Image: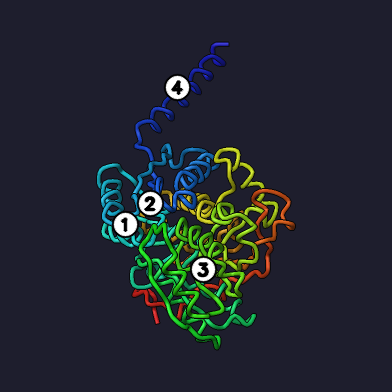
């Protein structure tokens, strides 16, 4: 009996010692720089925070004996504020990895801070191709989509179907400019013509003057090189102006399922768009989305699904590497294929671009939808090596040529 009691006490002391040791270690902090209150809040925002926390919970809540914590900051769509938040997270809060960063201008600013400090930063919400070209870094990962893939998947399909003259309505910042440029290249290369463009300030409420210019161009397609609230407002106001009824077709070059829900199928039906993820693609996407909806009360966007996937991939790499050292962790991340509800056989290239399938969808007619969120018809699955910029075309200085 004494031996049994002694053994039991030894186990208790060992467990207590391990718990004490784990408590002595600082938490592993992951930092989300998000748009929590402006035009991209539905795309990323609190949903991205929730997705990151779900990934942490599913992973077990700790790694290498350290509790995992998610901290977030609202950048208010201001590049200087995003840089300051990144600086504070990395210098003062002990954050080891930054995720999402929502918009392109804010991502470029935060990316420079992370690069200077040798920390991993993973972009889920921003789209600018510059993030894996001129602004690439050894610890930068562009995970979900970019302007090249959006342009390539949507623009190519449109021109092939005879929609070969374009006019662009473009948000006047890094993301919109890159999206217009990349789509223009695809249109011209495919035999189409660009008849003109007009640029609008971010977070515009009145698109009337811009839409009148687009209408006057007589272009078959009005390419919306914007996102979030700007895309929603442009689509709604274009319908009010009767642009689509007059024969012109709108092509939102970056739209999310939350945008289509806001617009409504009556107005959005027939739109062609490219997405990296859709909640109703298969059993895996449906299972994840069901759990996400229980918390957020709406389906996840591709950016939010990408947050879950990328945070999980990072934590697995930390565990495998046995350290949070950026060089060791990114090495494992780039060597390890990604297979989950977001990507099948995904791969992070040397320029930081995560290569995965992209999807071309058409927005359903109201009569085709079975209910809210049943918005898309899958037209094509585009393999990642065809959707994203070829490595040989990269302008990233890290790419060996």
Query: Nearer the observer, disc 1 or disc 2?
Result: 1
* Residue 253 marker: 3
Is 249 displayed left or right of 371 in the figure? left
Residue 70, given in percent of the width and then of the height, sits at: 41, 41
* Residue 98 marker: 2
Residue at image mark 1: 110
* Residue 13 marker: 4
Tell me which residue sits at (26%, 46%) in the image: 88
Query: Nearer the observer, disc 3 or disc 2?
Result: 3
Q: CA distance from mark 1 to mark 2?
A: 9 Å
Instruction: Rate crowding at label 1 as few (under 14), some (14 to 19) or many (20 or more) other CA atoms within 10 Å.
Output: many
Looking at marks 1 and 2 on the same chain, the residue that comes earlier in the sequence is marked by 2
Residue 357, given in percent of the width and then of the height, sits at: 59, 67
Kindly indicate whether the residue at mark 1 contacts the one at mark 3 (C-beta within 8 angstroms): no
Q: CA distance from mark 3 to mark 2?
A: 26 Å
Q: Is disc 1 placed on a helix, strand or loop?
A: helix
Looking at marks 4 and 1 on the same chain, the residue that comes earlier in the sequence is marked by 4
Q: Is disc 2 placed on a helix, strand or loop?
A: strand
Query: Nearer the observer, disc 3 or disc 4?
Result: 3
Kindly indicate whether the residue at mark 2 contacts the one at mark 1 (C-beta within 8 angstroms): yes
Query: Nearer the observer, disc 4 or disc 1?
Result: 1
Kindly indicate whether the residue at mark 2 contacts the one at mark 3 (C-beta within 8 angstroms): no
């Amino acid at each position: 009996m004494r031996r049994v009691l002694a053994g039991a006490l030894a186990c208790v002391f060992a467990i207590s010692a391990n718990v004490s040791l784990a408590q002595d270690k600082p938490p592993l902090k992951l930092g989300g720089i998000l748009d929590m209150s402006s035009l991209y809040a539905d795309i990323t925002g609190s949903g991205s925070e929730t997705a990151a926390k779900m990934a942490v919970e599913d992973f077990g809540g700790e790694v290498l004996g350290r509790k995992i914590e998610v901290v977030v900051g609202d950048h208010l769509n201001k590049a200087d504020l995003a840089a300051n938040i990144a600086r504070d997270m990395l210098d003062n809060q002990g954050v080891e990895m930054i995720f999402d960063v929502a918009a392109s201008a804010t991502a470029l600013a935060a990316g420079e801070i992370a690069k200077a400090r040798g920390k991993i930063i993973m972009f889920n919400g921003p789209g600018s191709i510059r993030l894996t070209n001129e602004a690439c870094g050894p610890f930068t990962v562009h995970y979900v989509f970019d302007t090249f893939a959006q342009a390539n998947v949507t623009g190519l399909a449109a021109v092939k179907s005879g929609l070969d003259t374009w006019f662009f309505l473009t948000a006047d910042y890094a993301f919109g400019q890159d999206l217009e440029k990349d789509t223009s290249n695809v249109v011209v290369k495919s035999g189409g013509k660009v008849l003109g463009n007009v640029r609008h300030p971010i977070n515009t409420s009145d698109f009337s003057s811009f839409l009148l210019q687009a209408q006057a161009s007589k272009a078959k397609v009005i390419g919306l090189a914007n996102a979030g609230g700007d895309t929603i407002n442009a689509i709604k106001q274009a319908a009010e102006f009767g642009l689509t009824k007059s024969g012109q077709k709108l092509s939102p070059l970056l739209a999310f399922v939350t945008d289509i829900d806001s617009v409504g199928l009556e107005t959005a039906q027939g739109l062609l768009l490219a997405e990296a993820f859709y909640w109703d693609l298969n059993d895996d996407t449906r299972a994840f989305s069901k759990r996400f909806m229980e918390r957020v009360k709406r389906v996840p966007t591709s950016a939010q699904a990408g947050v879950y996937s990328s945070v999980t991939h990072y934590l697995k790499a930390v565990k495998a590497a046995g350290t949070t050292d950026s060089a060791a962790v990114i090495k494992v991340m780039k060597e390890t294929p990604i297979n989950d509800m977001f990507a099948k056989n995904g791969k992070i290239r040397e320029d930081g671009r995560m290569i995965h399938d992209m999807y071309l969808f058409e927005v359903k007619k109201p009569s085709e939808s079975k209910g809210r969120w049943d918005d898309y018809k899958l037209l094509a699955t585009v393999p990642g090596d065809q959707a994203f910029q070829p490595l040989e075309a990269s302008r990233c200085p890290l790419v060996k040529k």
